[in-house]
Amino acid sequence: MAKEQEENGNGSSKLLIELPLGEAAEGFELEKAICSHGLFMLAPNHWDPISRSFSRPFRLTSPPLTVTVGISQPPTSSSSTLYLRVYGASSLSPLHRHSLLNQVSRMLRLSESEENKVREFRSIVEALHGEEEATECLRSFSGRVFRSPTLFEDMVKCILLCNCQFSRTLSMAKALCELQFEIQHQISSSKAAEDDFIPKTPAGKESKRKLRVSKVSIRLESKLTESKVDNSVSDLQLSQEPHDFVGMGSFPSPEELAKLDESFLAKRCNLGYRASRILKLAQGVVQGNIQLTQLEEDCKETSLSSYDKLSQRLRQIDGFGPFTCANVLMCMGFYHVIPADSETIRHLKQVHSKSCTVQTVGRDVELIYAKYAPFQFLAYWAEMWHFYGQRFGKLSELPVSDYKLITASNMKHKKIATRKRSKTSAEE
């Protein structure tokens, strides 16, 4: 059972909730659980590599309430609890507290069924240990893949991941959260749809040119000993303050998006054709044609038959093709299907020396990862995430400004020079 207590500091109150990890406590690392998929980099999520903590606004239900919450793990190897700090609140109603705990548990995959999947995947990997060079990166993978607090946010972000560079996906997600802030504070007006409207969020340019990265890597080497660093991290976690979400709200709700004009949404957030798909998704949820709660209930049985039924239902939603459906279903807990795109083709060629095409990639991934069934995606993603780390450095240590460097074009070259965030820069 979660415990809570009120904290006071720096002139503001915050509520501390201790969330027991239960069966997931053994081997659980917050850093690995969060920094395990590009979704953690998308607004309004914020990972702090110095304090190793996570923060974002959460939208609680019954009645609606938005709160900023910081999540950290006590710096002890035997920690079996997560700290949830609710800023600007001295208490939560039982319904709000329940809503928050459910969303955090979903985001970090802390359910009993997800824990069973993690253990089964690890058992398969251990049984195959020594058969291939990639085994070590599989063994170091936590088995948890970060997702959003709600299914609706996952579905929208899976649309944002389609047919564009990651830099634009980052930009679109940020713009949607800025728009939510404007809606919430009633500063959005009908004039925003005029031709002279300029989006506040710069559009991430999609260019075939490769991103130019300076050959000089700005790395601030720590002069502290390992023990001093650990102590510093401990102090930061204990005195954690929320990230400053200036001008940015939470992720917009179906109700907020459903009432917007398509052309305004497309221009404000640089969504292009995605605006129509996101709008229809939101309207379908509001009108009751898309039952998110029922979809979540139906995915509790992660069998092949339930996957096929859910996939058929998702395919009926405008814009939900095979790639988007597979990504959404992965977020829902199905790991036997690998969402294949051009990145998959590149990965198979670089890592497995397998030349394939759009027509053959589906068959090729089935053959390569069949030994990990029913967790083919987890094995594939463990490899992919490992090689991203080899190219760009440890992904949990990247500053936010370097997220845009994670592109397919940069994956074709040697390790990219990135900047590790220093304690000094974190405090500026």
Image (spheres, rainbow, N blue to C red):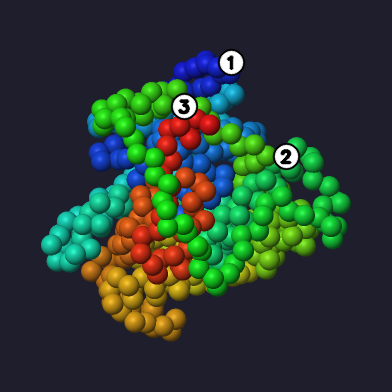
Quote the CA–CA distance across marks 3 and 1. Answer: 14 Å
Left or right relative to 276: residue 27: left
Q: Is residue 80 above or below residue 335?
A: above
Say if residue 97 shows up in the picture: no
> Marks 3 and 2, how far apart in space?
26 Å
Tag 1 residue: 11
Looking at marks 3 and 2 on the same chain, the residue that comes earlier in the sequence is marked by 2
Rendered-image quadrant of the N terminus: top left
Residue 83 location (% of width, % of height): 41, 29
Residue sitting nearer the eye, 231 or 110? 231
Mark 3, residue position = 240
Look at the picture and state if 64 lies above or below 198.
above
Say which residue label 2 marks. 184
* Location of residue 256 in the rendering, given as x and y in whole percent from the top left corner: 71, 48
Question: Which of the pair 74/386 is nearer the observer?
Answer: 386
Is residue 191 something one can see in this rendering? yes
Report helix, strand or loop for mark 3. loop
* Residue count near mark 2 (Cα–Cα under 10 Å), binned few <14, some 14–19, many ≥20: some
Give the residue displayed 75% in from the left and 37% down from the top.
Answer: 185
| Residue 6 image position (x, y, % from top left) | 50, 17
Task: Answer left or right for 242 relative to 51.
Answer: right
Chain-order first, disc 1 or disc 2? 1
